Image (cartoon, helix red, strand yellow):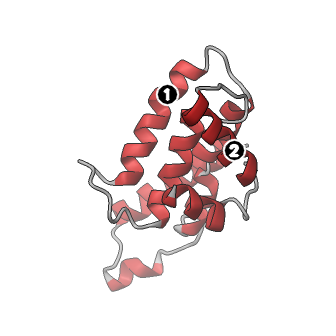
Amino acid sequence: MHLAKLYFAWEDPIIHVVDEDVFFEEKNNAILHGKSSPYYSETLNNAICAIGANLAGNQDLDLPEPASEFFSARAKALLDIEMDSPTVATVQALVVMSMAARLSADLGLHLDVSKHKLTGLLTDRDLKIRAIAFWGVFVHEQ
């Protein structure tokens, strides 16, 4: 719940995709009553937790790998199954999982950082990889 709360506090207000009250209500119905809902899925839950774990700095969780990677891998695996009968929650999960454009901007991949090559902070290889990642995200998101 903590990771989802972080997502709703910091990420969802920027790109509002999931209604927080409905998400937690439908999650509660799924867990307590076994009710399926077009507005909640474990795929969406894991995608939200992946973002929340990233916001938390992957701390305080007893997992064999960084929490954001753990939840992201689970979301991707569950997505394959969920695509057989997609719902609104599937669409929401796909949006949450594809926030690559926002993350690339957060990392400054769109900025000209070639001056850092002179200071030794970045190499030609770093500059090339950053450019490839930025343009790949740009084209993919179009």
Residue at the front extreme, as displayed:
33
Q: Residue at x 59, y 39 (%)?
A: 44
Nearer to us in this view, 138 or 34: 34
Of the 4 image quadrants, the one containing the C terminus is: top right
Identify the residue at image location x=64%, y=35%: 29
Q: The residue under label 2 is which amino acid type?
A: Glu
* Disc 2 residue crowd, few under 14, some 14–19, many 20+, Cα 10 Å: few
Q: Which residue is mark 1?
A: 78
x then y, percent, for residue 9: 64, 67
Vertical placement of residue 80 versus 112, above or below:
above
Q: Residue at horizontal 32%, vertical 64%?
A: 60
- Element at label 2: helix
Q: Residues within 10 Å of mark 1 (few under 14, many from 20)?
A: some
Instruction: Label 1, secondary structure: give it.
Output: helix
In the depicted view, which residue is nearer to us: 1 or 134? 1
Image-quadrant location for residue 120: bottom left
Q: Position of residue 53 (x, y in %)?
A: 45, 58
Q: Position of residue 83 (x, y in %)?
A: 61, 20
The CA span between labels 1 and 2 is 21 Å
Determine the image quadrant of residue 73. top left
Q: Residue at x 37, y 62 (%)?
A: 58
As drawn, is 96 to the left or to the right of 57? right
Where residue 140 sits: x, y (%)?
Answer: 64, 41
Identify the disc placed on residue 2.
none
Going from N to C along the chain, the mark reached first, 1 or 2, is 2
Give the residue at mark 2: 25
Type of amino acid under label 1: Leu
Please state if 69 lies on the left or on the right of 142 as rendered: left
